[in-house]
Image (tube, rainbow, N blue to C red):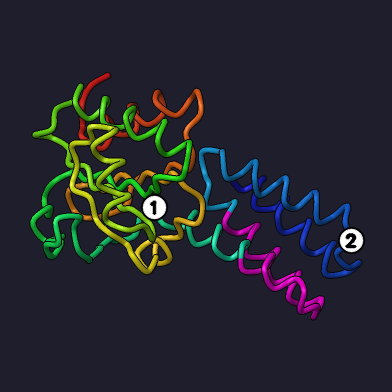
Amino acid sequence: DDDQKQLIDDLFVFINQHGLDQRLYNLSTNLGEALEQSSNPKLGAVVYERMADALRNLKRPELAPQIARMEAVARRLNLPGTFMEIEGTTAEGEKFDWQSYRGQVVLVDFWASWCGPCIQTMPKVEEVVDQIGTDRVHLVAVNIQEGNDRVQAAVERLQLDATVLMDIDGQVAAVYEANAIPQTVIIDRDGIVRHVFVGGGSRFVGQFRAALREVLGLAD
């Protein structure tokens, strides 16, 4: 970690001294992406935060979307270790009671019916939950900015057995930086975010299962 931190410091000292060109921009974003997938993703957050500062120093208004994206990714990478609490209305029109999940392990899965990877990944998440036991893990599927009819049709098609929360205005997703979906968050019994997975892919299920078992304290 110390070597990686020094590399980050050296890179941005150089950028501050010589300016940010396309080559250094590519180098920095590649470093951020590599650290994002590493065992210490919070170092990736440091890179994205410092990249946002470097872009801001260029004082070019057209770079505002890139700056916002960098800052959003940094906030998402910093989620593990923070307390999570969400509120809203379920697909059945009832007030969502987050307090009722206190003391339990919860999965919060951000999704939308138009999102192909979401539709592919959610059944896999539910399959892992079923294998481990629904008495041990509770699944909350947060739908982002869709109408009830569309959501209910997708839930029925997927035969999804989860509490579905309607994030009509996208505010829950915004708070927890679910700007790329599917995003699956594992929350421990104390309400602390332990792991955040973005996307699906061939390695997702194995990594997700291992992380969930670790949070539950189950032997491999």
Q: Residue at x 25, y 63 (%)?
A: 86
Q: Measuring 45% from the left and 45% from the top, which residue is drawn there?
A: 114
**Where is the C terminus found, in terms of image quarters?**
top left
- Would residue 113 be found to the left or right of residue 134 on screen? right
Left or right: 192 in relation to 138 = right
Q: Earlier in the sequence, mark 1 or mark 2?
A: 2
Residue shown at the point (22%, 55%) measured from the top left:
191
Residue 211 lies, in percent from the top left, at 34, 33
Q: Main secondary structure of the magenta part?
A: helix
* Disc 1 and disc 2 in contact, CB within 8 angstroms: no
Q: Residue furthest top?
A: 220
**Residue type of the residue flagged with mark 1:** Pro
For the residue labelled by badge 2, is the local secondary structure a helix, a strand or a loop?
A: loop
Q: Circle 1 sits on which residue?
A: 80
Q: Is residue 107 left or right of residue 94?
A: right
Question: How many residues crowd around disc 1 within 10 Å: few (fewer than 14), some, or many (20 or more)?
Answer: some
Q: Of the residues tagged 1 and 2, which is closer to the observer?
A: 2
Up the image or down, 16 lies above or below 184; here it is below
State the residue in front, 45 or 22.
Answer: 22
Please tell me which residue lies in front, 44 or 115.
115
Crowd tier of the residue under label 2, counting other residues whose Cα lies within 10 Å: few below 14, some 14–19, many 20 or above: few
Quadrant in the rendering for residue 52: bottom right
Residues under labels 1 and 2: Cα distance? 32 Å
**Which quarter shows the N terminus?**
top right
Q: Provide the residue designation for mark 2.
A: 21
Q: Is residue 64 magenta?
A: yes
User: Dot 1: what SS?
Assistant: loop
Q: Amino acid at mark 2?
A: Asp
Q: Position of residue 126 (x, y in %)?
A: 26, 31
| Residue 92 place in picture, x, y as percent | 14, 56
- Which residues lie in the magenta part? 45-68
